[in-house]
Each structure stands twice: as structure tokens, then as C-alpha cells.
């Protein structure tokens, strides 16, 4: 661990950065071609080594996808001897085998570094107590923020997910100023603190929130639930690339994620054709790991939908800025031939003042044509039964999605909460058993 060493939260000016990225990319391609790994020898067989000298040459390189990691399960994409690796994580696939990733000590140093940068960008200081509510274990969230917090010099509380009562007790007794968790769990903690009457005793001011998509409306709900000056900030990452710490939002530039592009080179491509899109256009984020040793990835198709923000931000930072993740290309629902992103539904719901912060989407597949149902909680301060909200939202969803949606408003606090792991918002119904219970 490189304790005491300065953190770079600003990045490099364009020319220096482009040169550095080019050098790193060229070294990476050379290493992948010569490391005697069957997957890479095959994938790079047509590539002339000397042809990759700058970042501009990246478009001649092949993509990698999640299926490559699955097809080479468990360790076929590891490019270093296993004796040189010291950590393994895995992301639980929704179906089939998990995706396994391993790290060398050098990879772990970089991982700690980018998470420490993320925390520093959010305004976290070495004298802070970081209450880390991401799950510890195979999931990268817990240990990623943990090592980042230690690298910055914080006192990290490795509380993990779940056990809300203990979490609230620790937050109250330690007066932690920073918490990291999924947005849904962060909100749950605020709701429980309010129900126990201890919200006023908590001193949390910064939330480092990610691992699942969350809209601007959800940010407002979370900040209102905590009250005071609470700042909900977005952290992005994925296990295949490193874990959390690929990109981070800063409080002086809300809505933009700063990609740590000395380690992760971003591109945005058309999800269908794979063609690189001009800055500013929405598409699929593709990441190349420029420095990772154990499992480097070339042009990895993340499935996450964003765009590169072409304009410079308000700060002196040089990182490539991307928009917050709108959703995943594979989350898209096709309802009666119309494409719907769950994020669009969340945005419509969160724009409505009578809706609380909890909702679920059901795709009812019992009939010949899929039907869309949305169940949402009323806000705490909403008067009445919610009939007005129901008809208003049905109209808004029809206008925005061009699909008839059945909306059901329910009492605040009546829907199940997720205490550990990522929140599940979309359910499918195939028989008469209601998936929402
Ligand atoms: O979720 C890593 C992480 C942990 C990120 C803690 C942030 C905080 P995976 O389990 O591999 O890794 O899931 C990665 O989650 O491709 C996105 O679809 C989604 N995701 C992660 N962060 C965000 C975010 C971790 N801030 C997948 N906004 C990614 C939207 C996110 N989606």
C-alpha cells in the first residue's frame, strides 16, 4: 500500500494524457499477444503488433464481451501466472456461472488508488470515518471502497450490507460523515433512522452511491430523506474492469462521471453496429484497461448506456466526463414491440411529487401480448388514496413510453425493501402468482 503518497484527482492535460494512453495501449497489445494465453493469441491473431502506436489505433482492435469471460470460465483470461495473483472476486450472473476476476498486488494498488480518488473527489478527507455499507465477499463493492478508504487515510467501518439496526447504532455513535452503499440501501437507512426517531442524531453528509442505476429524482428522494446538507454522489464501476472506482461524480459537477482515463480508456459505441459514436451521442460504454495485469480487457462492451460529455466541466480536472448511466442495453424491455428502459419509468415516477421512493415494474406475460404494470409507494406527505397520482402517472407513462401501463399506488413503507445486494425493480409474471407478493 502506498500510504502517504499524493493522490491524483485532477488527471493529465490532453496532450500528455493521449501520449500516456497510447504508450499504455501499445504495451498492453504487445503483452496480450505474447503472453501465451490461448484466448488472446486467437483473438489478436490478425493484429500487426507495430500497428498499434496511439489511442487512435484502438478502433482496429477487437471487442471483448462478458461471454468471453464465461466461455473461458473460470480462469482462461488470466494473463499472469496464478502464483502472481492474490485476490479473486466474482459477480453473480443472473443465470449460469459467475464471472470470475483475479488481481495481482499491482492491480490491487491501482484499485485502491482509483477508489481513494473517488472518495477524495466526493470531498472525503483522511480524518473521516467511512461507514462502508457495500457487501463484502465475492462482490467487489465492499473491498473496493474499503481499500480506497484506507488508501485515503480514512477509518473504514466494514459493516457490509444488512442489519439496519446495527448500522444505525454505529452511524449514531461514531458520527460518521461518509457512508458508501447502494442508493436503495442508503435510502432505507434514512427511512429507518426516521422511524426510530434518531435521524437528527446522525451526522452523515456524503453518500458514495452506486452499483445500480439511479435517477436524478431518486437522488432528490435520498437527499430529502436524509435532510440537512446530505450529498448523494454517484460512483460507477464493474467487476470485469476492476470493481467500483472506474468513474466518480464530484459535487461541483453533478450529473457527470469522471472516468479515471489513465487506467480505463472509454469509448461509446452504437450498441447494434459497434461503430464508435461521436462525443455527445448516447450509446454503449466500452472500456479498455490500460494498466491491469491479471485480467486486462480490450474494448470491453459494458452494456451500460451513457455518452461522453463533449463540453469541459466547471473544474480544473482533465478526466473524460461521461453522463450518469441511463440503463443497460440488456435491461431494455420490449413491450408490444416498443422498447422501454426501466430508467425511463423511474424518471417518470420520481418526477411526480406524490410518489415515494419505492416502486417495482411487472412485465405481465400471461396473455398473448405483454402488459406493463407499475406498483409505487405514495410519499410520506401525500394526502389521500393516490387516485390522482394513479391517473396522472398512467397518462404520463402513456405519453413518454407510448404504452398503456397499469399503475397501482400503495401505502408508504408497504413494499419489500432490499437490505443487501442490488435492488431488483423489474419482475416478470408468467402465472397467477403475483411476483410482488
Ligand atoms: O456493481 C461495482 C460497484 C460496486 C460499483 C460499488 C459501484 C459501487 P458489478 O456487480 O460487476 O460491479 O456490476 C456492474 O452494475 O455494469 C452497471 O450496469 C451497474 N452499475 C454499477 N455502478 C453503477 C452506477 C459493481 N453508478 C454493473 N450507476 C455495471 C448505474 C451502475 N449502474
Image (cartoon, helix red, strand yellow):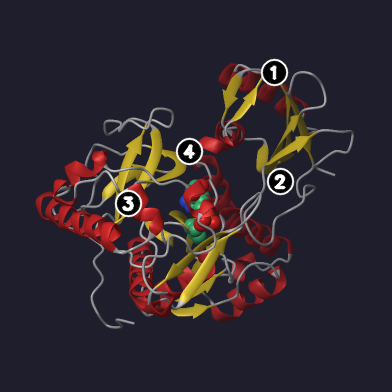
Work out how far the residue at label 2 is from the one at label 4, CA to CA, in angstroms. Answer: 27 Å
Which numbered disc, 2 or 1, marks the residue that appears first in the sequence? 2
Q: Regarding mark 3 in the picture, which secondary structure is present there?
A: strand
Q: CA distance from mark 2 to mark 3?
A: 45 Å
Going by the image, does 358 lie left or right of 319?
right
Quarter occupied by residue 128: bottom left
Q: Residue furthest left?
A: 15
Image: 156 above or below 264: below
Q: Report whether 378 appears left or right of 266.
A: right
Q: Is mark 4 within 8 Å of ligand 1?
A: no
Residue under label 3: 288
State the image coordinates of residue 129 (x, y, percent, origin top left).
Answer: 47, 77
- Residue corresponding to mark 2: 380
Quadrant (top left, top right, bottom left, bottom right) of the N terminus: bottom left
Q: Do the CB atoms of the residues marked 4 and 1 lie less than 8 Å apart?
A: no
Secondary structure under the numbered disc 2 in the rendered image: loop
What residue did someone put label 1 on? 404
Which label sits on residue 359?
Answer: none
Task: Locate residue 144, reporting x and y percent.
Answer: 46, 68
Image coords of residue 310 (percent x, y): 25, 36
| Relative side of 27 to 45, left or right | left
Q: Is residue 327 above or below residue 420?
A: above
Q: Earlier in the sequence, mark 4 or mark 1?
A: 4
Amino acid at each position: 500500500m502506498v500510504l502517504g503518497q499524493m493522490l491524483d484527482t485532477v488527471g493529465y492535460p490532453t496532450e500528455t494524457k493521449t501520449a500516456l494512453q497510447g504508450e499504455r495501449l501499445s504495451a498492453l497489445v504487445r503483452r496480450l499477444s505474447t503472453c501465451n494465453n490461448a484466448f488472446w493469441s486467437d483473438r489478436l491473431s490478425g493484429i500487426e503488433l507495430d500497428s498499434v502506436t496511439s489511442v487512435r489505433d484502438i478502433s482496429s482492435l477487437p471487442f471483448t464481451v462478458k461471454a468471453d469471460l464465461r466461455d473461458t470460465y473460470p480462469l482462461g483470461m488470466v494473463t499472469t501466472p496464478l502464483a502472481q495473483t492474490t485476490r479473486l472476486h466474482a459477480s453473480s450472473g443472473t443465470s449460469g456461472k459467475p464471472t470470475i476476476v483475479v488481481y495481482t498486488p499491482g492491480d490491487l494498488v491501482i484499485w485502491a488508488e482509483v477508489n481513494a480518488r473517488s472518495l477524495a473527489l466526493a470531498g472525503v478527507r483522511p480524518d473521516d470515518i467511512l461507514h462502508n455499507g457495500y457487501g463484502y465477499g465475492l462482490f467487489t463493492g465492499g473491498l473496493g471502497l474499503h481499500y480506497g478508504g484506507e488508501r485515503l487515510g480514512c477509518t473504514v467501518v466494514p459493516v457490509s450490507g444488512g442489519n439496519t439496526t446495527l448500522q444505525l447504532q454505529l452511524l449514531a455513535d461514531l458520527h460518521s460523515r461518509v457512508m458508501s452503499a447502494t442508493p436503495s440501501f442508503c435510502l432505507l437507512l434514512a427511512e429507518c433512522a426516521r422511524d426510530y426517531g434518531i435521524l437528527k442524531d446522525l451526522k452523515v453528509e456524503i453518500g458514495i452511491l452506486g452499483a445500480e442505476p439511479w435517477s436524478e429524482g431518486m437522488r432528490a428522494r435520498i437527499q430529502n430523506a436524509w435532510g440537512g446538507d446530505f450529498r448523494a454522489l454517484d460512483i460507477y464501476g464493474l467487476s470485469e474492469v476492476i470493481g467500483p472506482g472506474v468513474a466518480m461524480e464530484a459535487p461541483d459537477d453533478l450529473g457527470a462521471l469522471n472516468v479515471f482515463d489513465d487506467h480505463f480508456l472509454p469509448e461509446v459505441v452504437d450498441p447494434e453496429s459497434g461503430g464508435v459514436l461521436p462525443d455527445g451521442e448516447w450509446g454503449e460504454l466500452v472500456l479498455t484497461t490500460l494498466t491491469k495485469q491479471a485480467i486486462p480487457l480490450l474494448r470491453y462492451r459494458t452494456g451500460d448506456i451513457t455518452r461522453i460529455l463533449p463540453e469541459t466541466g466547471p473544474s480544473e480536472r482533465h478526466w473524460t466526463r461521461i453522463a450518469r448511466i441511463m440503463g443497460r442495453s440488456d435491461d431494455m424491455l420490449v413491450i408490444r414491440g416498443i422498447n422501454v428502459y426501466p430508467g425511463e419509468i423511474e424518471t417518470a415516477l420520481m418526477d411526480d411529487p406524490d410518489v415515494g421512493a419505492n416502486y417495482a415494474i411487472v412485465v405481465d406475460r400471461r396473455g398473448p401480448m405483454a402488459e406493463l404494470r407499475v406498483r409505487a409507494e405514495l410519499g410520506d406527505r401525500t394526502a389521500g388514496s393516490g387516485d390522482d397520482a394513479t391517473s396522472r402517472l398512467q397518462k404520463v407513462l402513456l405519453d413518454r413510453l407510448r404504452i398503456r401501463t397499469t399503475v397501482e399506488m400503495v401505502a408508504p413503507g408497504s413494499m419489500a425493501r432490499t437490505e443487501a445486494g442490488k435492488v431488483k425493480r423489474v419482475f416478470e409474471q408468467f402465472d397467477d402468482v403475483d411476483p410482488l407478493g
